[in-house]
């Protein structure tokens, strides 16, 4: 199996990168390699997926700490039973802790302290992705998510034991969930291999869930996506993840939001950028333009003599701020179009303009440039 690339390398950042740096780097890569912009391009699709995975890990403080210290092995639990691990699970797998957290529990377990029986454990987190158009990010929206997650078995009420029976105390650890082992000069406590640290075993498992106490089920959840959300933002639905064990709390559901590229607008923070094509006569004489915006339409006054590439700002016509701090701006760039074909009358008028320019010296900028060129070679 090929060695996975470093997440920081994927995003083009150093390990000291801030949250803002991560977001900016991911947004740039996502915009470049988004499947909607690169249809049928397997390489771009792979890079988009790679960047998304890197951002998901590094934008999560807990996962980033584990990744910075242990790399991909820490996240995937390689050689330690597989599956996704959080920091506490990772340390437990190394040192054989029986639940709990903190240095007291860790070193107590290593050196024969009074370890404790495994208690309630929080359920695993779940992650899904949703893609919305820019207009929905502007106005805010709701999405109904369909996902599969494990739910407590109704037949056994989540115990895993056949209805009418109950889990029995583990005979290996006498219900303690831990066993003591001699390691050289030290006595160490590790999770009981018979009951996996739970303290009980199921002799007669439930036929519905085969003893797991959980059954996969398809559920529908509604998530509210706030106005002003940015591409790559992550929403958290508390208590909507996998159920815990021993009556532990559920994990959370994280929703990663992607925003589709827009055909007219580019987004930079709360500001929107667009280009408006205009004719030479419009910018020469000045005009009023009807400019599209996500609010509908806005009017832009273009003064006579406007040069191609000039940027105009329409205040408050951009994206709403996610935290309620007003709105961004709509930045309109003027792009003068050169006609590809001229009819006879248009050609006649332009030729007259050329003759007039030759007589008067043309515009000041061009005359100044030509004078500098002439001086250079004289």
Image (tube, rainbow, N blue to C red):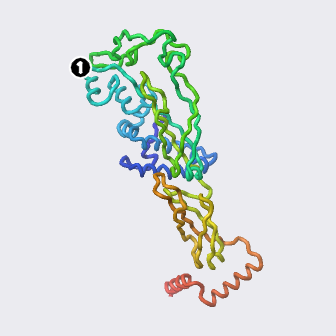
Query: In this rendering, would 122 be left or right of 35?
Result: left
Query: In this rendering, would 188 be left or right of 267?
Result: left
Q: Identify whether 93 is placed above or below 38.
A: above
Residue positioned 25% across, 21% down in the render: 113
Name, please, the residue furthest toward the left. 185
The answer, for residue 119, to whether it is visible in the render is yes
Name, please, the residue furthest toward the right. 344
Residue positioned 50% across, 47% down in the render: 232
Q: Identify whether 229 is placed above or below 170.
A: below
Residue 25 pos. (x, y %): 46, 51
Q: Identify whether 296 is placed above or below 89.
A: below
Helix or strand or loop: what does disc 1 sit on? strand
Q: For residue 170, what is the image quadrant? A: top left
Q: Which residue is mark 1?
A: 186
Viewer-nearest residue: 190 or 249: 249
Numbered-mark total: 1
Residue 154 pos. (x, y %): 54, 19
Which class describes the residues within 10 Å of circle 1: few (<14), some (14-19), or many (20+)? few
Residue positioned 32% across, 25% down in the render: 95
Viewer-nearest residue: 137 or 92: 137
Q: Identify whether 28 is placed above or below 332.
A: above
The answer, for residue 29, to whether it is visible in the render is no
Query: In this rendering, would 150 be left or right of 199?
Result: right
Residue 186 pos. (x, y %): 23, 19
Residue 223 pos. (x, y %): 54, 40
Viewer-nearest residue: 72 or 267: 267
């Amino acid at each position: 199996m090929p060695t996975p690339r470093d997440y920081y390398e994927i995003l083009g950042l150093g390990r000291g990168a801030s949250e803002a740096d991560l977001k900016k780097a991911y947004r740039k890569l996502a915009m470049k390699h988004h499947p909607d912009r690169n249809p049928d391009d397997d390489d771009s699709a792979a890079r988009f997926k790679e960047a998304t995975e890197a951002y998901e890990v590094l934008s999560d403080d807990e996962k980033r700490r584990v990744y910075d210290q242990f790399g991909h092995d820490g996240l995937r639990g390689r050689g330690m039973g597989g599956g996704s691990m959080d920091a506490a699970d990772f340390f437990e797998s190394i040192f054989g802790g029986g639940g709990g957290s903190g240095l007291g529990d860790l070193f107590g377990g290593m050196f024969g302290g009074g370890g404790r029986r495994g208690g309630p454990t929080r359920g695993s987190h779940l992650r899904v992705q949703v893609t919305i158009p820019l207009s929905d990010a502007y106005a805010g929206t709701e999405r109904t998510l369909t996902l599969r997650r494990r739910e407590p078995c109704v037949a056994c009420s989540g115990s895993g034991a056949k209805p009418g029976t109950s889990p029995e105390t583990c005979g290996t650890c006498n219900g303690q969930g831990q066993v003591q082992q001699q390691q050289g000069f030290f006595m160490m406590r590790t999770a009981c291999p018979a009951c996996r640290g739970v303290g009980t075993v199921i002799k007669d498992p439930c036929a519905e869930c085969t003893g797991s106490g959980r059954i996969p089920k398809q559920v529908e959840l509604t998530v509210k996506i706030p106005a002003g959300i940015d591409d790559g933002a992550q929403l958290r639905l508390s208590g909507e993840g996998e159920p815990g064990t021993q009556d532990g709390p559920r994990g959370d559901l994280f929703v990663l939001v992607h925003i589709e590229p827009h055909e007219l607008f580019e987004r930079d923070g709360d500001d929107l950028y667009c280009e408006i094509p205009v004719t030479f006569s419009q910018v020469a004489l000045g005009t009023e333009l009807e400019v599209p915006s996500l609010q509908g339409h806005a009017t832009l006054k273009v003064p006579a003599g406007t040069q191609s590439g000039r940027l105009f700002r329409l205040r408050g016509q951009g994206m709403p701020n996610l935290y309620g701090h007003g709105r961004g701006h709509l930045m309109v760039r003027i792009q003068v179009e050169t006609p590809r074909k001229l009819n006879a009358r248009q050609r006649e008028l332009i030729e007259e303009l050329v003759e007039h320019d030759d007589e008067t010296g043309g515009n000041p900028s061009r005359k100044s440039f030509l004078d500098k060129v002439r001086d250079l070679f004289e």
